[in-house]
């Protein structure tokens, strides 16, 4: 999950403020104020945040935004973003949430990557992340270096660069990651750094299943490994 420290430690306050503005022939408009603490910046080339409101069960985008070095929201062009509006009375807004969006994600539908979410009561609510510090206080993990897929397929013993999130238990490899299931819309990702370059190892929803990447081993990522009696686990040869 991207921006993990923000997901765990961020604390935000959201409030709907001001009186509804009514003009002839127009819908009510409410002002929404967002106050941020410790929200991490995103490189614009990698994506951005988007704020949304749920009005009578439908999504309304409040803004696409970035966060500057001082933790303040800005437009995608860098201008200050102090107030947002939603075309509804405050009582019609039941929820506000923030997503992470790809650079191309500037349409009217939110991504599945809900970053923060608040149910409103009396026009106010606390935006909270889908995971908490407590979710990960008991998280543990281990890895081993081996190449069970290639050794099996090639009947060779010369490979030594495989990295798997497992451990040897009673002479059999078992999954080692103790993680809660990734929140809806999110996945974990495994990476290894080689000569200063990040190499992808795949994405997965929990440590007891294979990841979605087989670019090096050529294994079938949907099934258990075919050698050593190994159960599914994230990793790559």
Image (spheres, rainbow, N blue to C red):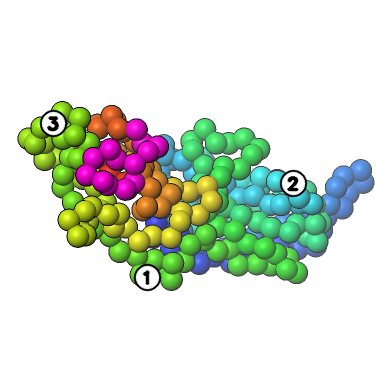
Residue 17 falls in which quadrant of the image? bottom right
Query: What is the magenta range?
Result: 220-232
Whether 190 is drawn above or below 179: the answer is: above
Estimate the x, y position of residue 185 in percent, counting from the top left: 52, 47
Q: Residue furthest left?
A: 158
In the image shown, does 67 or 165 lie closer to the viewer?
Answer: 165
Query: Helix or strand or loop: what does disc 3 sit on?
Result: loop
Q: Residue at x 28, y 38 (%)?
A: 226
Left or right: where 16 falls relative to 22:
left
Which numbered disc flags the more N-terminal residue, 1 or 2?
2
Left or right: where 90 falls relative to 222:
right
Eye-nearest disc, 3 or 1: 3
Residue linked to disc 2: 58
Contact, mark 3 vs mark 1 (Cβ under 8 Å):
no
- Disc 2 crowd, CA 10 A, few/some/many (<14, 14-19, 20+): few
In the image shown, does 157 or 143 lie closer to the viewer?
Answer: 157
Whether 49 is drawn above or below 17: the answer is: above
Whether 179 is drawn above or below 214: the answer is: below
- Disc 3 crowd, CA 10 A, few/some/many (<14, 14-19, 20+): few
Q: Residue at x 34, y 65 (%)?
A: 139
- Disc 1 crowd, CA 10 A, few/some/many (<14, 14-19, 20+): few
CA gap, disc 3 to disc 1?
41 Å
Estimate the x, y position of residue 74 in percent, counting from the top left: 53, 49
Query: Helix or strand or loop: what does disc 1 sit on?
Result: loop
Whether 105 is drawn above or below 141: the answer is: above
Estimate the x, y position of residue 126 in percent, counting from the top left: 60, 67
Residue linked to disc 3: 155
Estimate the x, y position of residue 158 in percent, counting from the top left: 7, 35
């Amino acid at each position: 999950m991207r921006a993990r420290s923000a997901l765990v430690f961020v604390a935000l306050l959201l409030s709907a403020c001001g009186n509804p503005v009514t003009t002839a022939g127009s819908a009510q408009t409410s002002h929404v104020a967002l106050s941020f603490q410790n929200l991490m910046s995103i490189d614009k080339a990698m994506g951005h945040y988007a704020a949304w409101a749920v009005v009578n069960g439908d999504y309304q985008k409040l803004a696409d935004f970035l966060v500057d070095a001082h933790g303040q929201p800005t437009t995608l062009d860098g201008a200050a973003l102090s107030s947002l509006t939603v075309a509804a009375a405050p009582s019609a807004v039941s929820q506000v949430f923030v997503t992470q969006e790809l650079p191309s994600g500037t349409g009217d539908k939110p991504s599945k990557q809900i970053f923060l979410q608040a149910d409103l009561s009396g026009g106010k609510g606390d935006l909270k992340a889908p995971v908490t510090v407590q979710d990960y206080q008991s998280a543990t993990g281990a890895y081993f270096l081996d190449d069970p897929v290639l050794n099996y397929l090639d009947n060779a013993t010369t490979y030594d660069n495989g990295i798997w999130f497992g451990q040897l238990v009673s002479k059999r490899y078992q999954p080692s990651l103790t993680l809660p299931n990734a929140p809806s819309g999110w996945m974990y990702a495994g990476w290894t750094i080689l000569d200063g370059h990040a190499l992808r190892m795949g994405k997965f929803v929990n440590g007891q299943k294979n990841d979605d990447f087989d670019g090096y081993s050529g294994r079938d990522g949907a099934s258990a490994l075919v050698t050593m009696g190994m159960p599914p686990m994230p990793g790559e040869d």
